[in-house]
Amino acid sequence: MTADTTVDSLLDDDLLSRFRDRAARYDRENAFFADDLDELAERGYLRALVPAELGGLGWSLADVVRAQSRLATAAPATALGVNMHLVWTGVARLLHDRGDDGLDFVLEEAAAGEVFAFGISEAGNDLMLFGSGTVADPQPDGSVRYTGRKIFTSLSPAWTRLGVHGLDTASADAPKLVYGFIDREDPDVRTLDDWDTIGMRATQSRTTVLDGAVVAPDRIVRRLDPGPDPDPFVFAIFACFELFLSAVYAGLAERALALAVDAARARTSARTGLPSSEDPSVRRRIAEAALALDGVPPQLVGLATDVADGTDHGALWFAKLSGVKVRTVETARDVVDAAVRVAGGATYFAGNELGRLQRDVLAGVFHPSSDDAALNTIANAWLGPVQD
């Protein structure tokens, strides 16, 4: 597809129907969304954020927010998995638009068909971008060897490039967090077959073991001090991650609400002989869910536009981004819960779509930022940090 491709034309109704049918099978079989990924790649979706002059679709961050929500109405796990590729291309795009070409190779390789994954999360590491338990060992030729374990590596069966970070404690300027990109062909990268979860099963976000995996000198993209850092690279990762993640859960909730409406119209009360859609309590549940969900998309699109435009929110930026993630996920969980209550006991069966959405939406609480971390960030933004 060409650079004038729209969200609705790329993610057309026929594609969403196919993806929705596959989503049930992927969940049942605990299988990777391979066919979905092939279709998305063929249509150019993995090039969405690559500028047109570099061979991409040239979409904006706001376009991708809309697209990820639309995709998640059919296949939330597919959308969540693709998110990680979109985060890296989003980071590269934001830096490119600000005159920093240090990650242009990400855009060029994405245009050529490479698939990027996110190797940041580590068991027990609640510092996330601000620290790492992975060892980044500098080599004489300027390369870096990474040793450690990365968890929740979505796209594990398919990625060809893995963006990682680790801590260098050996260099003269240590400690430094070192960010770089590993090739799939590296013999010191192992992927464990350990993904057996209750939801978002098709992401196949398996554990990645780095046994001294090498990042070449020209693929080292940042050396930063541990802890919060004003570098635009860190901001871009955080912004793209929170916005695209939130978009997935917004789309999931939109589908749950539509299923609740269908169920309310289809069910008839044995007591009154009337459809559930005329029951005041059902109407109230659906109205409250719709009211809450209605406020989410404008927030996400507005913040995505502000990020792309370089709007100055100053010290409130991280509070706004972490806050919209927590609000969106909590809203999605409430909407799904209301939908399940409207649709009734059929949703308790494993093959029911709403039952699957109920399991999928739970994953939202495990993604950063957690509600505790977000509240701490917001409190610091408004009140300043607590004094030692």
Image: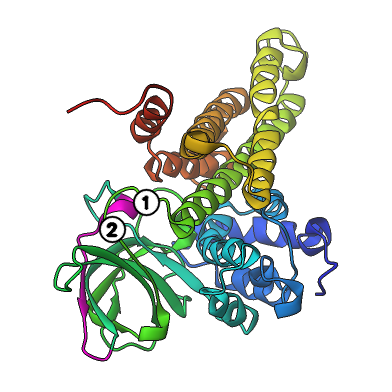
Q: Is 361 part of what is drawn in magenta?
A: no
Depth check: give the residue in front, 172 or 57: 172
Q: How crowded is mark 1: few (under 14 residues within 10 Å), some or many (20 or more)?
A: few
Work out whether 112 lies above or below 287. Answer: below
Direction bottom: furthest residue: 141
Work out whether 33 lies above or below 246. Answer: below
Q: Do the residues labelled 1 and 2 touch (CB within 8 Å)?
A: yes
Residue 368 spot, x, y in % from top left: 40, 44
* Residue type (three-letter) at the residue carrying disc 2: Asp
Q: Does residue 259 show up? A: no
Q: For residue 201, which quarter of the picture?
A: bottom left
What residue sits 38% from the left and 74% below the top?
180
Q: Is residue 242 left or right of residue 214?
A: right
* Residue type (three-letter) at the residue carrying disc 1: Asp
Residue 367 spot, x, y in % from top left: 41, 46
Judging by the rendered image, the residue that carries numbered circle 1 is 229
Q: For residue 225, which quarter of the picture?
A: bottom left
Q: Is 135 part of what is drawn in magenta?
A: yes
Q: Does residue 161 show up? A: yes
| Disc 2 element | loop
Numbered label attached to residue 225: 2
| Disc 1 element | loop
Depth check: give the residue in front, 376 or 246: 376
